[in-house]
Amino acid sequence: MHKQGTNSVTVKRPVGKRKPTKVSRTFLLKLELRSHPTFLCVVRGALEPLMESLGFSGEENRAIIRGVDEAVSNIMRHSYHGCPDKPIDVYCNRLERRANGRSEQGVEVLLFDCGPAVDTTKIQPRPLDEIRPGGLGLHIIRGSMDAVEYKRAGRMNRLRLVKYAGASKGGSACPEENPQ
Amino acid sequence: MKISARRIDQATILDVTGNIDMSNSPEVRKALLLEIRAKRAPRVVLNLTSVEYIDSSGVASLIEGLKTM
């Protein structure tokens, strides 16, 4: 279900009739999942040792897992409306940037789904002072990651989540960011 | 994920073990709301000490239980 590699350039997706997606990154990990909620634990289980191997602290590791888990859950719930057999692709890539005169190691997690385009103007986190169920996922994703970016890529939704080791949480800018 | 119920004095305690995410949070919600609505005891305690992970859907289930009481 997943593989670690170093030379992925063009990714051919076997699901449906989607076009091959050119990806100019060197990936650490690729997961091809179906949108069944039971696969959430597979994502968490794959990310934890990977992030540990990249040098993230326990707290950072948990934040990444939390953010990605919530994002994948959102795809299952909102993009696919609970349909359990739709494709979700997860890519992890190592990043490096210069910040404050020193090198910072990071990771980007790219999530692809084939759901309808997302109207980002309608996706706003709700006020947290309202004690009611639901609507916490966006807060958790944004609070867990250093950058969260959505993009419509052809017929696919692409969500990019970025986290740097040792970086202050919550910033959205990624200066001088380069994949390794 | 497993849920078991026990009674201590004036409280029903629901012991949860495992991880709570979108795949099983409806079970937590169902068990919690059933216990609250049954009114078998004045207090319902959810014991999460053996839960390592809970996502927003799990938190939503807890809030729903809280709002039901």
Image (cartoon, helix red, strand yellow):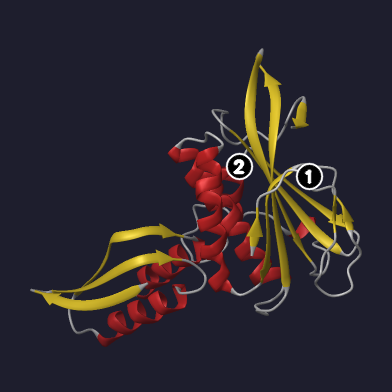
Circle 2 sits in a helix, a strand or a loop, which is it?
Answer: loop
What amino acid type should be assigned to the residue bearing mark 2? Met
Residue A31 rendering spot, x and y as whole percentages: 67, 59
The image's mark for residue A7 is 1
Residue beneath disc 2: A145
Disc 2 to disc 1, C-alpha distance:
26 Å
Q: Which residue is located at x 92 percent, y 64 percent?
A: A19
What amino acid type should be assigned to the residue bearing mark 1? Asn
Mark 2 vs mark 1: in front: 1
Circle 1 sits in a helix, a strand or a loop, which is it?
Answer: loop
Quarter containing the C terminus of chain A: top right
Residue B29 position by quadrant: bottom left
Left or right: residue A104 compared with residue A158? left
Question: Which chain is home to disc 1?
Answer: A
Left or right: residue A64 compared with residue A94? left
A11 or A90, which lies in front?
A11
A8 or A98, which lies in front?
A8
Q: Residues within 10 Å of mark 1 (few under 14, many from 20)?
A: few
Left or right: residue A147 compared with residue A52? right
A137 or A39, which lies in front?
A39
Mark 2 or mark 1: whose residue is earlier in sequence: 1
Instruction: Point out the residue furthest to the bottom here.
Output: B38
Quarter containing the N terminus of chain A: bottom right
Q: Which residue is located at x 48 percent, y 66 percent?
A: B21
Relative to residue A97, is residue A13 depicted above or below?
below
Residue B15 position by quadrant: bottom left
Q: Which residue is located at x 63 percent, y 29 percent?
A: A105
Q: Residues within 10 Å of mark 2 (few under 14, many from 20)?
A: many
Question: Which chain is home to disc 2?
Answer: A
A77 or A120, which lies in front?
A77
Q: Which residue is located at x 85 percent, y 56 percent?
A: A152
